[in-house]
Image: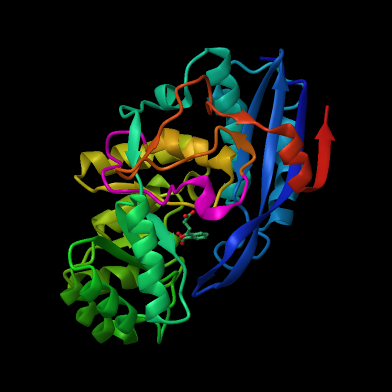
Amino acid sequence: MLIDKIELYHVKLKLTSPFVTSLGVETDVEHIIIRIDSEGLTGWGESVAESTPFYSYETIHTAWHILRDFIIPQIIGKNIQSVHEAIEPGSRVRGHMMAKAGMEAAIWDLFAKAENVSLSKTLGGTRDRIDVGVSIGIQSDTTELIKKTDGYLKEGYKRIKIKIAPGKDLQYVSVLRKEFPEILLQVDANSAYTLDDLNLFKTMDQYNLLLIEQPLGHNDIFDHSKLQRAIRTPICLDESIHSLADTRAAIELDSCRIINIKPGRVGGFTEAKLIHDYCQSQNIPVWHGGMLESGIGRAGNAALASLPNFTLPGDISASKRYYKEDIVYPEFAITPDGKITVPTKPGIGVEVLLDKLEKVTVAKESFR
Ligand code: OSB
Ligand code: MG
């Protein structure tokens, strides 16, 4: 396909309520939307680099730079026959997974649309609906946490994940577990602890948690293997996993027993699928993480999460859990039994609402 035009949109979406984690407070989400036009078709992707380098070193501006100066020049004006051919030259760029993943997503969407198949089908998805959970930020107190949790459970969410940080951990978990003895419950520390906190994690073993997400260093695999061998609750790695190679190291060292897959963190759907397939071969469950995406990124996430080894509920919640209005139609909604329907139309399977996209765009650049 001849790539005629590529556009980058720096978008800023206001969250309905602030999202508090051990990394800080987010009130708006800034991401890059990538649009590719080719032979009358349009492909869309979302790069999940944020405004701050706190979850990952990447930011909107580093991703923009990598896209503009190194990724787009390899694609624009070229006649490309496959997703692999489009992204292969970009593999010379080390790191910058979120920049690469946003472009790869737009290319996948374009090629799926050209073949008139859904992204889920192209990626090898086997489900038409996926189990979803919700990620709840750190609340001001446990009363507020119970109230929020209760609301989400009533909406149908199948699993609750709470963010934890030193001082806002054991008490929050014990109160929530007492109030809801049966729910699927997990915690996410976003790297807020060290091995000095071993006793805290041993104590957590009594709360029947599904998993503990990224307790230690954001790039660590070694210390996690020490922690995992000292506790019963499965550790799940998020921040530390950027590739299939990282995944293999973590599994072989027993640093975790579950993997969180986010296409943005691993450079795109191609690597995400390799990780999914490897974990399946090792009997390691995976689940789909989230980066507070707009409906564009969310549609791609839903497609990926329809693959068979995504056996735990994902952080893929309804649009209205994040935003007053989404920028796609139809927006994502949760069914009363806690599922999200995987789009079946070609590509990402949702329509991008151009007027809404323009309204949330703070900067834009076109390439021909
Ligand atoms: O650690 O999983 C995380 C959001 C931004 C950055 C990192 C994380 C998150 C979430 C939100 O937990 C999950 C969602 O999109 O619902
Ligand atoms: Mg996480």
Residue 317 visible in this rendered orientation of the protein: yes
**Magenta stretch contains residue 366:** no
Q: In this view, does 164 lie to the left or right of 66?
A: left
Q: Give the range drawn in magenta.
A: 306-325
Which residue is depicted at the point 34% across and 52% down? 157
List x then y, in percent, for residue 344: 45, 22
In this view, 227 is above or below 253: below
Our reading of the magenta stretch's main secondary structure is loop
Which picture quadrant has residue 43?
A: top right
In which quadrant will I find the N terminus?
top right
List x then y, in percent, for residue 194: 38, 81
List x then y, in percent, for residue 225: 27, 68
Nearer-the-camera pick, 24 or 249: 24
Which residue is depicted at the point 28% across and 34% down? 308
Nearer-the-camera pick, 21 or 200: 21
Q: How many marks?
A: 0
Residue 215 visible in this rendered orientation of the protein: no
